[in-house]
Amino acid sequence: MTKFIFVTGGVVSSLGKGITAASLGVLLKRRGYRVSIIKMDPYINVDAGAMSPFQHGEVFVTWDGAETDLDLGHYERFIDEAITGENSCTTGKVYSAVIQRERSGGYNGATVQVIPHITNEIQDRILKVGEDKDVVIAEIGGTVGDIEGLPFLEAIRQLAGRIGRENILYCHVTLVPYIAASGELKTKPTQHSVNELRRIGIQPDLIVCRSQYPVGRDLRDKIGLFCSVLPECVFEAIDADSIYRIPAILHKQDFDTMALRKLGLNTDVQPDMEDWNTFLEKYDNLKGEVTVALVGKYTEIKDAYLSVNEAIAHAGIANGVKVSVMPVEAEDLEKGSPEDILSRADAILVPGGFGQRGVEGKIAAAKYARENRVPYFGLCLGMQVAVIEFARNVLGLARANSLEMDEMTPHPVIHYMEGQKNIADIGGTSRLGAYPCELKKGTIAHSVYGADTISERHRHRFEFNNQYIELFEKAGMIVAGVCPTGGQVEIMENTGHPWMLGVQFHPEFLSRPVKPHPLFMDFIAAAVKYSKAKN
């Protein structure tokens, strides 16, 4: 029988429910259990594909092409498994499925209601994820008390009656705030949060207390008493310098052991965290520092380029150096001097994106990198702007551009993909998910991957215009990777540059703390080399 762990949050949002779920996931997987993690998002959007980074942060793309919440990126990085669109459940998906079933007569004329039809649909989706797993961890988005989250909470309450309470564990993550004026940590918000859960009919089995400061034994005993939770089932999760320390912090308190005991599962095998601990040892012993300029249009939003930042960090640790990411707003490069802004950078990375805002600044960043021989890594749009810059300033193709930015350009070096020309809807209609790529021998990409064929994840509507391949390659910017199924250019390299590479895909989604992505590793290695030569 599959066991289910539900992670809820109280008091405030952004407490780290996703990291708690991911940490528990890696600990259980490293004990030998088959684990999956699902995110239940109460928003009515069908998925995250059309949501603004200002509100939502990055869109994480699964291998099967689902545009999902960034927490799924945490899940993959921690448990090191490629999860699917089924691991993302939104209110929009649930209601769409129920309405479609009602329209087709699937309910035999019954009055369709939140209970039982919506809650049953939620439960069915949770159970489906667990069909071939030992443990499913489900994070309930939002905060207990939010109106939009009530159907999900009711669904997980009902599930206990459907499959047996012994097969379910409820874990509540809550805030224990520090009041500076009194110099005290306060437990009352946690008590109120748990009371909200209990009013719904959910009694938490475990409580995780987020705090800036240690939550002492006395306070945890108090929380346990008022919340009807055993004292040994109340844990502290104080702020850490790295999210990758959280599994060790929780394991030291027997968090995973207690979860297994509550579920009646074997606790004899301890988690094998040797490679994880090696990673943390490297993190603690970094020598030297390089600066990577991250040129985008959402750099003030912490989570807008989350997977990129994580991939850079993983690669830095693998290279034994601290990487300082220098956020650069692309529009600032349009207004000011790229030399003044980018001169401190040991490498430049331009991530993916959509729309015209800041594009000329990104093109300026590519120009600066090419002319000054600074390592350059372009992801998706980052590859496209490097192509545009090369076309304008090396090939002499005046007003060369992408059709996304200029529909009247005389040189559309980036154009619509064939299947994207007549699409009106925004969400879920790009070229999404994993596609193969054949690598050209003798290129940086082939050397770095050490393979002839790879698979990477995509999210784009525009591509390199293959009519210009010959012109580009004669001038030194070559096609290093092509999709064998559609002929799309996947990788471009500037052979006259020490390290200038653009990819149409998103390698950041496949980087793991214990398995950094090879392209990011080589990019940071190039940054280290450039820094040493510069100094």
Image: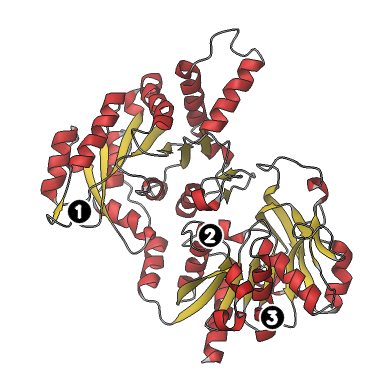
Q: Residue furthest front?
A: 335
Question: Does residue 133 appear in this view?
Answer: yes
Q: Amino acid at mark 1?
A: Tyr
Dot 2 amino acid type: Tyr
Q: Residue at x 31, y 57 (%)?
A: 248
Quadrant showing the N terminus: top left
Q: Is residue 12 left or right of residue 444?
A: left
- The relative height of residue 394 versus residue 407 in the rendered view (above or below) is below
Residue 467 x, y percent position in the rendering: 89, 64
* Amino acid on which disc 3 is placed: Arg
* Disc 3 from disc 2: Cα separation: 23 Å
Q: Which residue is mark 3?
A: 370
Q: Quadrant of residue 453?
A: bottom right
The CA span between labels 2 and 1 is 30 Å
Q: Nearer the viewer, mark 3 or mark 1?
A: 1
The part of the image, by quadrant, that contains residue 523 is bottom right
Residue at x-position 61% and y-position 74%: 335
Near mark 1 (Cα within 10 A), the count class, few <14, some 14-19 or many ≥20, is some
Q: Relative to 119, is 229 on the left or the right?
A: left
The image position of residue 115, as x and y in percent, is 45, 17
Question: Which of the two labelled residues, at mark 2 and mark 1, occupies the earlier sequence position?
Answer: 1
Residue 305, numbered label: 2
* Residue 346 visible, this orientation: no
- Image-based side of 74 in relation to 258, left or right: right
Which labelled disc corresponds to residue 178?
A: 1
Q: Quadrant of residue 192?
A: top left
Q: Earlier in the sequence, mark 3 or mark 2?
A: 2
